[in-house]
Image (cartoon, rainbow, N blue to C red):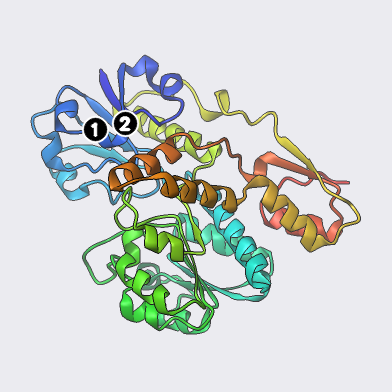
Amino acid sequence: MRILADENIPLLDEFFAEQGEITRLPGRAINAAAIASADALLVRSVTRLTADMLRGSPVRFVGTCTIGTDHLDLPGLAAAGVQVASAPGCNARGVVEYVLSVLLTLSERTGLDWRQRVIGIIGVGEVGSRLAETLRNLGVTVLCCDPPRAEQGAEGMLDLDEVLAAADIISCHVPLTRQGPHATGHLFNHARLKALRPGTWLINSSRGPVIDNSALNAVLATRNDLQVALDVWEHEPSLEPQLVARCALATPHIAGYSLDGKLRGTAMIYQAWCEFNGQPAQCALTDFSPTAGCNYLQLDPDAPADWQLHRALRWVYDVRDDDARLRAMLAQAADQTAIRAGFDQLRKDYPLRRETPCIRVGGAGRDSARLLKAAGFTVPAN
């Protein structure tokens, strides 16, 4: 069995070494020529895979260690008899923590308490639903929009324009779809962007083309009241430096890049692989994941509950670090070739980042313990 895999997928040997011979390539270098001699593919979102690329190859299994599948030609692969597996929810916790850090940062910069603002969540799947639950547990008013789920009978769903009219903050968590009644490509077009309420915070950690980046650049040129945080970009790894400069926060598609999320994604694809081959799994994530040694954070027990929450959120993840790294890369890049290389390098060399359940917090009083648990932290009983 010959397995072709993205070199940035962790635990490849641990999960797949006994399944066959593994060949590693950069995700963007996986092409038809490389695929021709493979029996199975393990990819991430940077690999655009079509049925034509697999034509004539023996590939019958494609696993993407990601929540989204918009980089895969699903109808074409299905028609070719290729089994496709993804990892829904694998990095949802990391994306929630990314959004919380963005909210905290913009709150500090504007002087507005993010927990007192109305937050609209567009897309209530694995990520959006977990974000909504976390925010509500923290006492935040949340409005949700998800037309496909509304049609399936989900309660409490509002129309997009209703959410935009009522929310102070908009956070996007939709898949990228180009066709159909609920297509999300350029969901935020020039008209919707121009019509955003004064002082709106707009966050996109889903897919870049959900927001028309050209239109956003034009709107931001005339509206300095908007606070925009982008983790995903319409033409990534290419970036428009002017748009980056106009964003309050800009990061290189790393919202879900927690160590735990990455490992979870590989484990989920391994499980799908075993099911595809009709074989029992020989290992599990608990065999390899560094969960035994949770990090410990000691807080000042005399500090107010809000301060303790903010201190812990900053400790587990600070979006300002990723924003600074991206801007530093752009300052050194001479052209789009250098920007594309720099964008991918930032993702490849991403520093270790754990999720809140792996952080044990001490020194929390009763009120702060409630908030910290709502945010996902492990708080030992006093």
Pointer 2 with pointer 1, Cβ within 8 A: yes
Residue 167 visible in the shown view: yes
Residue 155 on image: x %, y %: 48, 74
* Local SS, label 2: loop
Q: In this view, does 240 lie above or below 50?
A: below
Q: Gap in Å between the C-alphas at discs 2 and 1?
A: 7 Å
Please tell me which residue is depicted at 87% across the width and 50% down the height of the picture. 300
- SS at mark 1 in the image: loop
- Which part of the image, by quadrant, shows the N terminus? top left
The quarter of the displayed image where residue 342 is located? top left
- Crowding at dot 1, Cα within 10 Å, few <14 / some 14-19 / many 20+, comes out as many
Q: Mark 1 points at which residue?
A: 30
Q: Which residue is located at x 47 percent, y 44 percent?
A: 90
What residue appears at the point 69 percent right and 57 percent down from the top-left corner?
Answer: 374
Height in image: 42 above or below 168? above
Q: Which residue is drawn at 32% across and 70% down?
A: 187
> Which quadrant of the structure image shows residue 161?
bottom left
Compared with residue 183, is residue 343 higher up or lower down, i.e. above or below? Answer: above
Q: Mark 2 points at which residue?
A: 26
At label 2, the amino acid type is Pro
